[in-house]
Image (cartoon, grey):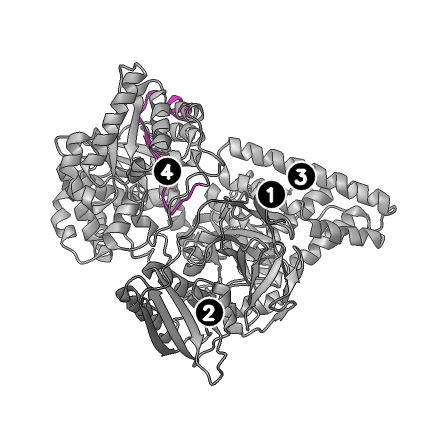
Amino acid sequence: MSDSSQSLTLQAPVTGVVVPLAAVPDPVFASLTLGEGIALDPLGECLHAPCDGEVVQCARTHHAFTLRTAAGVELLLHLGLDTVELNGKGIEPLVAVGDQVRAGDPLCRFDADALALGASALITPLVITEAAGWQLLPSKHREGERVSLGEPLLVLTRTAIEQSDIRADGPLAERRVTLALASGLHARPAARLRAIAREHNVNLTVQQECSSDNAASASAASLSALMNLGLTEGATLKLTAQGEAAEAAEAALDAAERLLTTPEAEEHSAPASSTLTAVALKEGELAGLVASPGLAIGPLVSYQLPLPAVPLMGEGEAVETACLKKALLSVGEALANAEAQATRQGQSAEAEIFAAHGAWLDDPDLAAAAGQHISEGRSAGQAWREALDAEAARLAASGNTLLAARVADLRDLQRRVMVELSDDQQATLPELPKGAVVVADELTPSELVAVAAQHPAGLCLAGGGTTSHVAILARARGIPCLVAMGASLIDAANSATSESVILDAENGRLALSPSATQRAEVAERIDARRYEAEQAQALAHEPAMTLDGREIEVCANIGGAEEARLAADSGADGVGLLRSEFLFLERDSAPSEATQRDEYQAAVKALDGKPVIIRTLDIGADKQLPYLRLPSVPNPALGVRGARLWASQPELLETQLRALLGVTPLDTLHIMLPMVTEVGELREVRKRLETLASEMGLDTRPRLGAMIEVPSAALCARSLAVEADFLSIGTNDLTQYTLAMDREDPALTARADVLHPAVLRLIQATVDGAKGHCPVGVCGAAAGDERVALLLVALGVDELSVEPARVPAVKAALRCLNAAALADELPALLALDDATAVRQHLSVWLAQANQTDITTTTLERC
């Protein structure tokens, strides 16, 4: 690439599975502290250069490399997570600092098995640590997609944005510290040093103090320079900070000293492997991992499907290569058609799996391995079988549960292609008795789909994992399923004498010889749940009326017109939230007025006269658009987002308003503003909406509402309710801002609970403030939790908006609620100490009010 080029393409440094950087289980990478980029879960064992450049940093522990392109862009490749703690074990570096590399050149070889055992994850981030006047475009690759070595992965384009220089003539401050980080100054603390320098707007340098007059130093602005210092625990350092104010320099040194002198906590210890929970098994019981919850009774039936018969030897390399190519094309077309059909039917889980299989089918490494076997004389079918046998064995032995869970997918591809190459058409799915508990060593996704069509009561697998595609499909179909039950399962199936077994996919047990009494008890529970599910579905299109006579609207949260049709079919009373930002994401330019209007119109049409609430663009520094670059801020959740975007981007949002005003009929369309903090924001939008409607010659005006997502809006709900036509509480953000807990932080997820008394009091304040002025709804995730939904209604909420599939269950739960009686319990609930206490108290009350059975049933059905 020449310096004058306007784009820079980064190639995949290894064959692997795409992981968005935000999903990497390491807060420094996930928060983009190091910079933007992407990550791969590697399927190879050699890391390659993603572009031409100079190697400017090689970690002393061989786990990280930094390249600098001729245009000044710096790229960090970080092999695995917490691999710094392996001290280079299992990694062989193939380059050194100063080497010039071309795209595709090998940087290091690594032993995947050794790394998987010692590191918390093999996920390998590729991060732009120094953009140097370049801008990263959104990746075209989806999470879970497989990419091949050398395939285009990311694209950067030139931008005119430049960073302002920090004054170099300000006050200078120095500090001497002793490094206390056990793993030395590696990528994570280096990124934090850079963040400290930026936060305090200072030039921060680090120098190792030693007897030599030529002690190396590095600026915190350069991660590669910091890491190249090779600083280890116990090193004596001189820190220097210079900025416009002496206070800033001292504050930066205070923060840097705390970072460098505080031993690192074990933030990213390896996750617990999927081992069986210790359960007190009775005689005649087997244990397994719950892949899909539920209960089942039925005969134990063993499932075995042999691979199609194919010739061992071929008829020559040219003939067999052509046969394999034809078979791969045929299977590829079938997968593409299956993906398209699943998408049309709204079966997103199936569609994603078919897409992943299609990508894997295109893997050049698999084709090359099969080609090698063909050159050795094998037939096309046998060559494909042996190639996938080898790959499956490698994944199974990797020690990585995520990779091992993909073995069933490989077996599925193996069978599909071999069927194309076989004259044996007898290897069809065996007939299974309806209501059987099916036992198998493994099932491929396509086998699961075929088995599900025969209506089994449940599934038990000797292998597999809870993250496998088979587990996803079983959950999507509501089939109780246990996995990882071991070889004893197959032995038990072959020797089973009982006419039926009990599959308890709630507590992870399979009872091989249950008593008649046990079978009767479980059968009664299953019948009760089935009846409740059927009743809920039969009444899904009816209003949800509480026992004390309150009618509650149950609407749907959707992302576009396709989901609007699912919402209508599910019995939703309308759309409580259409997230319009999906139209703006993954595009090179903003959608036109016509494009937006057509999408909004399709959603309104699908609901056939029921209300549709469309939220205006909710974007901010946390969710960037390539054509809308907002300034980077230390805390995006507190930055320019939602309604605040109007001040700086009036044309973008005015186009959206015109598109919304173009929808007919306007009396069913409601417009909702996100992140409203005060009534003035709402008034400005209403004023602009009125002006546009007059310019367009419209007589009707859509209703205008505000989201209650921050404490200030909840506390000022009365003034907002006077101006608004409706209010809708976004419980996810309201909980986050009330408790000061990032909802994306996995360490805080369990504690960021909407049932915290402080959050409940803000919801109550919103309802009280709106009383007599406008209705109040809830469109956050809490509305889909039946127990929480009951409490929200008792607090006075008029409408709940949930995922389409949950509509029948929520309606069923509401019909069994005496809202007034639960409202009498509110003072006691709101006086409790924390969310855990509220949940316990609520559960006791529901049990006493005969709500537990109904609520439990609806939860399990969903």
Residue 100 pos. (x, y %) = 65, 62
Question: Is residue 278 something that shows in the picture?
Answer: no
Could you tell which of marks 3 and 4 lies nearer the N-terminus?
3
Residue 326 placement (x, y as % from top left): 76, 38
Alpha carbon distance from label 3 to label 1:
14 Å
Query: Circle 1 sits on which residue?
Result: 446
**Secondary structure found at label 3:** helix
Q: Nearer the viewer, mark 3 or mark 1?
A: 3
Assign a secondary structure to mark 4.
Answer: loop
Which of the two marks, 4 or 1, is nearer to us in this view? 4
615 in magenta: yes
Indicate which disc, 4 or 1, sits on the residue closer to the N terminus: 1
Residues at badges 3 and 4 in contact (C-beta under 8 Å)? no
Quadrant hosting residue 175: bottom left
Q: Residue at x 32, y 42 (%)?
A: 641
Q: Which mark is residue 218?
A: 2
Residue 643 in magenta?
A: no
| Residue denoted by label 3 | 332
Give the farthest residue toward the right.
316
Locate residue 519, reporting x and y percent: 42, 51
Circle 1 sits in a helix, a strand or a loop, which is it?
Answer: helix
Q: Which of the 4 image quadrants contains residue 608?
A: top left
Q: Which residues are the magenta region?
A: 602-625
